Image (cartoon, rainbow, N blue to C red):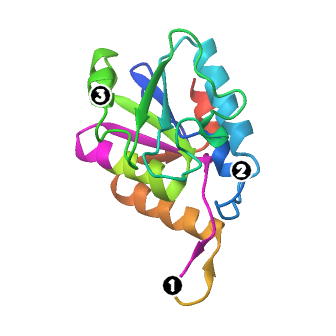
């Protein structure tokens, strides 16, 4: 299968690669390769001198591990923006809501927004859905995302793998093109 998207006008959007997700109160995650895959994309994007936008969740909730000043607020090792790379801060699930992300993308001449991050079903999904509804060509790098096992509301738990799989299917059906790290790296 050949890759059919022109990446010359693509921006890499890294969503919420923050340290808080490595411990309580966050539930168990599943993708042990999320950092490796996303860092490979970031390195390739930087080498190709293509635009990168980092997204950081700045929670306004008291006690949140993602609140500025908390240790978990910091970016995960290797995901810190380099000089010249943009940082968008948000306080809700979508990186488009209450931010200037749309304007930044237009100023970069972007057409495609290549997205990965934590977590697939929350901030990544909401960002992709919002972006698609705003007219952006959204792309999900599904193996460079991670999510959590969640309560099912009936006393059980939905595995993180099942949460991820369901959201990737929904996003791919309606909101974005779904790809893998290896496929995208080959296309660069």
Helix, strand, or loop for circle 2? helix
- Viewer-proximal residue, 183 or 89? 89
Residue sitting at x 42%, y 63%? 170
What quarter of the picture does the N terminus occupy?
Answer: top right
Q: Give the CA separation, mark 1 to mark 3.
A: 36 Å
Numbered tag placed on residue 100 in the rendering:
3
Residue sitting at x 55%, y 45%? 66
Task: Compare marks 3 and 2 and give the one earlier in the sequence.
Answer: 2
Look at the numbered discs 1 and 3 and tell me whether their residues touch, using CB distance below 8 Å. Answer: no
- Viewer-proximal residue, 68 or 76? 68
Numbered tag placed on residue 153 in the rendering:
1
Judging by the rendered image, the residue that carries numbered circle 2 is: 22
| Residue 174 figure quarter | bottom left
Q: Residue furthest front?
A: 62
What quarter of the picture does the C terminus occupy?
Answer: top right
What is the span of residues highlighted in magenta in the rendered image?
A: 130-153
Crowding at mark 1 (Cα within 10 Å: few <14, some 14-19, many 20+): few
Helix, strand, or loop for circle 3? loop
Crowding at mark 2 (Cα within 10 Å: few <14, some 14-19, many 20+): few
């Amino acid at each position: 299968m050949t890759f059919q998207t022109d990446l010359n006008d693509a921006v890499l959007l890294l969503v919420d690669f923050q340290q808080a997700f490595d411990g309580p109160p966050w539930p168990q995650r599943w993708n042990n390769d999320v950092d490796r895959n996303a860092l490979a994309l970031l390195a390739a994007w930087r080498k190709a001198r293509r635009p990168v936008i980092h997204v950081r969740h700045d929670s306004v909730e008291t006690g949140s591990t993602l609140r500025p000043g908390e240790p978990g607020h910091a970016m995960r090792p290797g995901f810190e923006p380099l000089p010249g790379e943009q940082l968008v801060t948000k306080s809700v699930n979508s990186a488009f809501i209450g931010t200037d992300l749309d304007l930044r993308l237009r100023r970069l001449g972007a057409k495609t927004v290549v997205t990965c991050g934590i977590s697939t079903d929350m901030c990544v999904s909401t960002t992709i859905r919002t972006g698609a509804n705003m007219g952006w060509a959204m792309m999900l790098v599904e193996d460079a995302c991670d999510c959590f096992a969640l309560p099912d509301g009936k006393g059980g738990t939905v595995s993180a793998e099942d949460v991820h799989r369901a959201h990737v299917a929904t996003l791919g059906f309606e909101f974005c093109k779904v790809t893998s790290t290896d496929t995208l790296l080959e296309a660069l």
